[in-house]
Every structure is written in structure tokens, then in C-alpha cells.
Image (cartoon, rainbow, N blue to C red):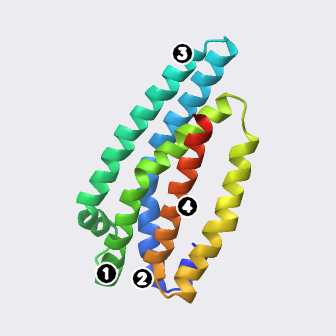
């Protein structure tokens, strides 16, 4: 957000719209994350690994269906969604491009949420924290700065860097869970 704010008001407005749209799905995904944490922790505490695995799979299927559907909705409805917030054509042009990234982000963000919830429920909190720190501060922030300012890709390049980071994070978390 700090990087994108330096690009100008149209970019900042498009980013703010994208963040608002993202929050529509994130809260539902986070709710399933909390459910995964609770169920996995409860079943592992009861020494019932089968039920813990079943809960993890159920939460993963639910979040993929939910966030995948929302991502598809964001993709299909990106023009009307952005137009709910503004009539400025410059912001609309940038906003619909950024919402493509938001749409792509949904499934991987859901995987990440559930995997982190499962790991927390299993008592494994250090590894997700360290991987999150490494990827966010070691990969995302530098790659976003490079793509936004050095290789002038602007706001869309910054969001592509975010999508790439979330994809890698989700896959790493899922592999750790498995």
C-alpha cells in the first residue's frame, strides 16, 4: 500500500477498491480457518487423527468452493464491482486489471488460510511464522518494489508479486500440512 500510494491517486484508489473486494472473501475464508484450527486441535487432542484429517479436508473443500466461487464472481463481475466505488475512468481501468489479480488470489489465499489453521490446531506455529516472514519480507516486499518502481509495471505488477507470493506460501503451507 505504501508503494502503490506513491504512484498517484488513481492507483491508490484502485488499490483501495481491490482491498475492499478482497475483504469480502477473506473474512469468510478466515472463518473456515478458525474452524479448521478448532476442529484439528480438538481431534488431535483426543488422539483421533482420522477425524482431524477429515476436518482438514472438509475445511479445505469448503474454502476452495467458497473462495473459488468468489474469485470467479470477482473475475466475471469486475467492471460492475469497480463501478460501485467510482465513476472515474482512470480508476476503473486500473481497478478492473487489479481485480483480475484479486480473482486469481482467492483459491490460493483459501488454501493458505486453511493450511495455517490446521498447523495452528496441531500446535505448529513457528514454521508458518518463519515461512511467512521469509516470503513476505524477503520475497514479496523486494519483488513488489522492483516490479513497481525499477521495472515500471505499476500497480498491476505489485499485485502480481502479491499473487506469486501467496501461491508459493499456500503451496509451502499445504506441503507442510501433508
Residue at 38% in and 58% down: 104
Residue 152 position in % (x across, y down):
49, 88
Q: CA distance from mark 4 to mark 1?
A: 30 Å
Instruction: Name the residue that disc number 4 marks.
Output: 165
Comes first in the chain, label 1 or label 3: 3
Q: Secondary structure at mark 3?
A: helix
Q: Residues within 10 Å of mark 1 (few under 14, many from 20)?
A: few
CA distance for labels 4 and 3: 31 Å
What label does residue 10 carry, if any?
2
Q: Position of residue 66 (x, y in %)?
A: 36, 40
Q: Quadrant of residue 3?
A: bottom right
Question: Which image quadrant: the C terminus?
Answer: top right
Per the model, the C-alpha gap separating discs 1 and 3 is: 52 Å
* Element under disc 2: helix
User: Which element carries disc 4, helix, strand or loop?
Assistant: helix
Residue matched to label 1: 88
Alpha carbon distance from label 3 to label 2: 49 Å
Real-space CA distance between mark 4 and mark 2, rounded to the nearest whole angstrom: 24 Å
Q: Where is the N terminus found, in terms of image quarters?
A: bottom right
Q: Is residue 114 left or right of residue 106?
A: right
Residue 51's tag is: 3
> Dot 2 surroundings within 10 Å: few (below 14), some, or many (20 or more)?
many
Of mark 2 and mark 1, the one earlier in the sequence is 2
Relative vertical location of residue 16 with respect to residue 22 in this rendering, above or below: below
Amino acid at each position: 500500500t505504501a508503494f502503490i500510494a506513491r504512484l498517484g491517486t488513481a492507483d491508490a484508489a484502485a488499490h483501495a477498491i481491490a482491498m475492499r473486494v478482497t475483504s469480502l472473501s477473506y473474512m469468510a475464508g478466515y472463518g473456515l480457518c478458525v474452524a479448521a484450527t478448532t476442529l484439528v486441535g480438538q481431534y488431535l487432542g483426543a488422539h483421533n487423527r482420522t477425524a482431524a484429517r477429515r476436518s482438514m479436508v472438509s475445511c479445505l473443500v469448503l474454502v476452495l468452493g467458497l473462495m473459488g466461487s468468489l474469485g470467479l464472481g470477482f473475475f466475471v463481475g469486475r467492471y460492475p464491482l469497480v463501478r460501485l466505488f467510482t465513476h472515474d475512468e482512470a480508476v476503473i481501468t486500473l481497478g478492473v486489471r487489479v481485480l483480475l489479480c484479486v480473482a486469481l488470489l482467492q483459491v490460493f489465499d483459501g488454501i493458505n488460510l486453511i493450511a495455517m489453521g490446521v498447523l495452528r490446531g496441531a500446535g505448529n506455529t513457528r514454521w508458518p511464522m518463519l515461512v511467512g516472514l521469509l516470503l513476505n519480507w524477503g520475497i514479496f516486499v523486494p519483488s513488489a518494489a522492483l516490479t513497481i518502481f525499477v521495472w515500471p509495471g505499476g500497480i498491476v505488477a505489485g499485485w502480481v508479486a502479491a499473487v506469486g507470493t501467496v501461491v508459493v506460501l499456500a503451496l509451502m503451507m499445504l506441503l507442510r500440512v501433508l
